[in-house]
Amino acid sequence: MVRLADLPTVDANHLLAKNTYQFDTQPFVDGPPLSKRRVAIISTAGLHPAGQDNFNLRDTGYRAIPGAYNADELVMSHASVNFDRTGFQQDINIVFPIDRLRELEAENAIGSVADCHYSFMGAGWEPKEIEASCNQLAGLLKEDQVNAALLVPV
Amino acid sequence: MPFDLGRPFGAPNDAPFQRDVLRTVLALFERTDGPVILDDYAKDAPGQGAPENMEGMVCPIPLPKPASPDKTDLIQSVLSEAEQLAPWQTLFRETHNRSTVGVCDLSLPDAIRFLGTLLNDDGTPTPPDRNPATTLRFATEDLRNFYLEAAAMRPGGAASTDQLIEWFWGETSAGALILALHPVCTASDNPDLKHVAADQMIPRVQRYRLQSRQA
């Protein structure tokens, strides 16, 4: 997350004005060492394969990105115009580090890369608004034996 | 990660840096001192905080000054700019083997003409299967991405992100077109069109230009 001090004042004030959600609990579990973890990317950059529907104006759903899909063909249809797109134009790994993840898998730093990855369109949703989608996604991750979710904000 | 919004892994085309960021993040899985673990990544991204002035910024090809506020001139001017930039955007596509242009299902010239119908508010009927708010959103996204991809290919080295953004919004007819659409679409009776125009068309840091256009 960018430092507030590095943002233009108008953007910093926008973020400071947001309500932060207070969770009732703080669950914490440990797990196997990283070398045994199966990792999936969950992005909020509004990414999806070119053939899938764009994220619509009030889209609380997610899009699946199969691991075999050519990441260079991913589309970004995020609604916000307040973040930089030029890095994404140059290199998909700036928001979706699939090549970097595969490199760590090749050197056995992680156990494996998941068969499927996912993207939401992060747009300031309250947790309740995306809870149903997240519950559904959790089931898909369990089916894929994923035990490490790499959450990548944009 | 203290990186600019839109760049969670810091720097494009810098695999070693991205790998270091990723290793640092994944190492959190081996920590046991939760439940809440907050750590700052100690390094800034390479190239972050580059000079923000426009000195030395050269457009891929010299574009004429943005057209006058006359609406017909403005649309023609954007079509002309896009035609001049097309070879550079094609070069981007061929060099990177990808493009971020294409979220709108219209060709770029058709997307520009669609924006023209909104600007002119001339009663041109929107096809029944076309949502004007969605088309506005993705047409402006494609237009901006097309220009930024073309500009990235200019000879003489890459401009900073800030330079490219300032160039688009301050020096091109495409930027002027989107700024001109704002008052028209925010006055629309269509709530979705109004919403897109108000929040999803012009970055917050560029909205000061709206005041200067009205002055």
Image (spheres, rainbow, N blue to C red):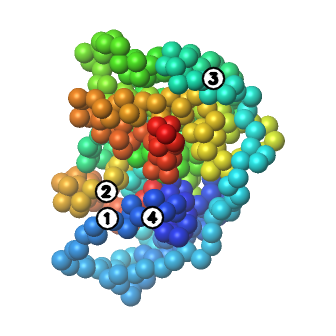
For residue B81, the mark is 3
| Closer-to-camera residue (B27/B102) | B102
- Residue at left offset 45%, top offset 50%: B204
How many angstroms separate mark 2 from mark 3 (CA)?
35 Å
Chain letter of disc 1?
A: A
- Residue at left offset 71%, top offset 48%: B54
B178 above or below A87? above
Which label's residue is closer to the chain start, 1 or 2? Answer: 1
How many angstroms separate mark 1 from mark 4 (CA)?
10 Å
| Closer-to-camera residue (B30/A132) | A132
Q: Are marks 2 and 4 on the same chain?
A: yes
- Residue at left offset 45%, top offset 56%: A154
How many angstroms separate mark 2 from mark 4 (CA)?
15 Å
Using residue A21 as the reference point, say whether residue B124 is left or right of it: right
| Closer-to-camera residue (B10/A3) | A3
Q: Are marks 1 and 2 in contact (CB under 8 Å)?
A: yes
Q: Which residue is mark 4?
A: A12
Disc 2 marks which amino acid? Gly
Q: Which residue is mark 1?
A: A18
Q: Are marks 1 and 2 on the same chain?
A: yes
User: Which residue sits furthest front?
Assistant: B215
| Closer-to-camera residue (A10/B40) | A10
Which label's residue is closer to the chain start, 1 or 4? Answer: 4
Image quadrant assignment for residue B192: top left
**Label 4, residues with CA under 10 Å away: few <14, some 14-19, many ≥20:** some
- Residue at left offset 46%, top offset 37%: B214
Q: Is residue A118 visible?
A: no
